[in-house]
Image: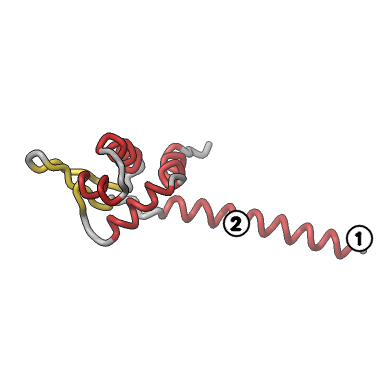
Amino acid sequence: MVQYGSLDASFAALADPTRRGILERLGSGSATVSELAGHFEMTLTGMKKHLAILEDAGMVITEKRGRIRHCRLGANVLDREASWLQGYRRMVEARMDRLGEFLERTE
């Protein structure tokens, strides 16, 4: 049986435009929670909730240094997700090929 837990967490994390924006921002370098909250014009509490979801998916790592929490991209490079999407795409393309063959036979 296929386990989708990590895929679910990744796709849930990517489903929100703010979280995708956080990943894009961290792609250019680390940032503090305060810097991210300011960039996205949201409260620290709201930003922490978004970061928790990204951390659960392995996409962001936060580290507390003194009183400041620093964020950077995590180790999840989306290999599992890309592999799943490629398999899904192959399945859909195979179904479309079979449909095309059926339509050619029935003309």
Q: Specify which label sits upstream in the sequence, 2 or 1.
A: 2
Pointer 2 with pointer 1, Cβ within 8 A: no
107 vs 46, left or right, is right
Q: Residue furthest left?
A: 66
Q: Residue furthest right?
A: 107
Q: In the rendered structure, which amino acid carries the disc numbered 1?
A: Thr
The chosen color scheme is secondary structure
Q: Position of residue 3 (x, y in %)?
A: 48, 38
Circle 1 sits in a helix, a strand or a loop, which is it? helix
Q: Position of residue 22 (x, y in %)?
A: 33, 51
Q: Residue at x 30, y 46 (%)?
A: 41
Q: Residue furthest front?
A: 41
Q: Position of residue 28 (x, y in %)?
A: 26, 62
Q: Position of residue 82 (x, y in %)?
A: 47, 55
Residue linked to disc 2 = 89
Image quadrant in which you'd find residue 96: bottom right
Camera-nearest residue between 62 and 6: 62
34 vs 14, left or right, is left
Q: Residue at x 28, y 50 (%)?
A: 74
Q: Quadrant of the C terminus?
A: bottom right
105 lies above or below 37: below
Q: Residue at x 46, y 45 (%)?
A: 15
Q: Residue at x 10, y 43 (%)?
A: 65
Camera-nearest residue between 2 and 42: 42
Circle 2 sits in a helix, a strand or a loop, which is it? helix
Image quadrant in which you'd find residue 99: bottom right
Judge the density around disc 1: few (<14), some (14-19), many (≥20) Cα neighbours within 10 Å.
Answer: few
19 lies above or below 45: below
Residue 106's disc is 1
As measured in the structure, the alpha-carbon distance from the residue carrying label 2 to the one carrying label 1 is 26 Å
Q: In the rendered structure, which amino acid carries the disc numbered 2?
A: Arg
